[in-house]
């Protein structure tokens, strides 16, 4: 799902295709960090720690807490160009809100865990 630019322009940022290589939109990340590699490194390290913490909190959390964590993760992912994580977190939000189908919540959470793993691998490669 395309995301609007967060810099106030009308530009549309199109997420890349799936996969570890595409788990992080480096061009978007560079724009968001103004090309400052130190800032980029710091932002990626924070996101990496945040994803680990939020996924752990979400595992057995009640629905309101899961929704809150997914929303936080979605926003953070959009800020760094981790489109797969943002999309998967949005699906977790939708599935958690639909209490009539618990299997969709499990599937959405599994997809989020995979997307986060891809993003974390891409971050590790970027930080090396």
Image: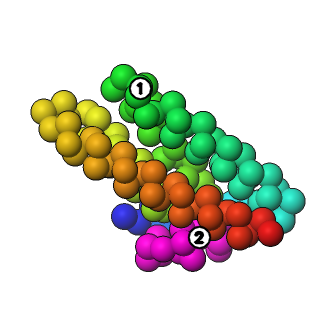
Q: Is residue 49 left or right of residue 61?
A: right
Tell me which secondary structure the magenta stretch mostly adopts: loop
Q: Residue pushed farthest left?
A: 100
Quick check: can you spot residue 28? Answer: no
Does the stretch in magenta take in 25?
yes
> Which residue is labeled 1 in the image?
61
Dot 1 crowding, Cα within 10 Å, few <14, some 14–19, many 20+: few
Q: Is residue 17 left or right of residue 79?
A: left
Dot 2 crowding, Cα within 10 Å, few <14, some 14–19, many 20+: many
Residue at horizontal 42 percent and vertical 51 percent from the top? 112
- Give the label, 2 or 1, closer to the camera: 1
Magenta-tinted stretch: 14-31
Quadrant housing residue 84: bottom left
Does the stretch in magenta take in 102?
no
Q: Is residue 100 left or right of residue 59?
A: left
The residue nearer to you, when weighing 7 against 93, is 93
Quick check: can you spot residue 116? Answer: yes
Q: Position of residue 94 (x, y in %)?
A: 28, 42
Q: Position of residue 114 (x, y in %)?
A: 45, 58
Q: Earlier in the sequence, mark 2 or mark 1?
A: 2
Q: Secondary structure at mark 2?
A: loop
Q: Relative to 43, is 31 above or below?
A: below
> Which residue is labeled 2 in the image?
25
Q: Dividing the image into 4 quarters, which one contains the C terminus?
A: bottom right
What's the distance in space between the residues labelled 2 and 1, CA to CA?
30 Å
Q: Relative to 97, is 116 above or below?
A: below
The residue nearer to you, when weighing 100 against 7, is 100
Q: Which mark is residue 120?
A: none
Q: Dividing the image into 4 quarters, which one contains the N terminus?
A: bottom left
Residue at horizontal 80 percent and vertical 52 percent from the top? 42
């Amino acid at each position: 799902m395309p995301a609007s630019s967060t810099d106030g322009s009308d530009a549309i940022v199109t997420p890349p295709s799936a996969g570890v290589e595409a788990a992080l939109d480096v061009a978007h990340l560079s724009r968001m960090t103004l090309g400052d590699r130190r800032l980029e490194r710091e932002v990626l390290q924070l996101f990496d720690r945040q994803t680990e913490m939020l996924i752990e909190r979400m595992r057995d959390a009640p629905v309101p807490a899961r929704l809150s964590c997914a929303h936080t993760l979605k926003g953070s992912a959009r800020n760094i160009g981790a489109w797969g994580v943002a999309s998967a977190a949005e699906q977790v939000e939708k599935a958690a809100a639909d209490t009539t189908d618990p299997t969709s919540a499990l599937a959405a959470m599994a997809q989020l865990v995979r997307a986060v793993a891809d993003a974390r691998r891409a971050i590790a490669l970027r930080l090396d």
